[in-house]
Image: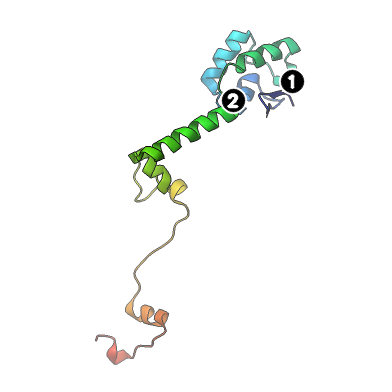
Amino acid sequence: MPRIVGVDIPEKKRIEVALTYIVGIGRANVKKILARAKVNPDTRTKNLTDNEFTRLQKIIDTYLTEGSVKSKVRDSIQRLKRIGSYRGLRHSQGLPVRGQKTRTNARTNRGKRKTVGAMKKKDLTKFQGKTVNKGEEGK
């Protein structure tokens, strides 16, 4: 497997798709990169020549990728928390940040469901360890 910017690129995929495995490079950036490097997007990664591969590496080095992108995002979130903005508070509470409703959805941020419901009086007393006689239920 060839490596670009410390990421293993899949050999059997088209170079247009394979470059998206690098964090910070998406489909739009790939098209620009391939146009600047003069590489056919339909070429498989294993069929790239050494010359094409080095041109791609030089162009990709000019972009923010992998660790630098991740640290920039982490620093931005820390800044939001530090200044006490609404978005920062939502990040620290683990709730959706961009205005989504939380009543029914937001399972990714809020975690697995914990059912909280009402109990019948009879079940509640059993749960508390007391038994209720039939005549005393209404009292």
Q: Which mark is residue 46?
A: 1
Q: Is residue 11 above or below residue 102?
A: above
Query: Residue sitting at 42 percent across and 45 percent down?
Result: 92
Badge 2 amino acid: Thr
Residue 65 on image: x %, y %: 58, 25
Residue 97 in sight: no
Seen at 67% across and 24% down, the residue is: 13
Towards the viewer: 62 or 134: 62
Q: How is the image coloured?
A: rainbow
What residue lies at 61% left-to-right and 17% top-to-bottom? 60
Q: Is residue 13 above or below residue 135?
A: above
Residue 128 drawn at (x, y percent): 40, 81
Residue 131, above or below 8: below
In the picture of the structure, the residue carrying the numbered disc 2 is 20
Q: Between disc 1 and disc 2, whose residue precedes?
A: 2
Image height check: is 78 above or below 124? above
For mark 2, give the secondary structure: helix
- In the orientation shown, which residue stands out farthest toward the front? 82
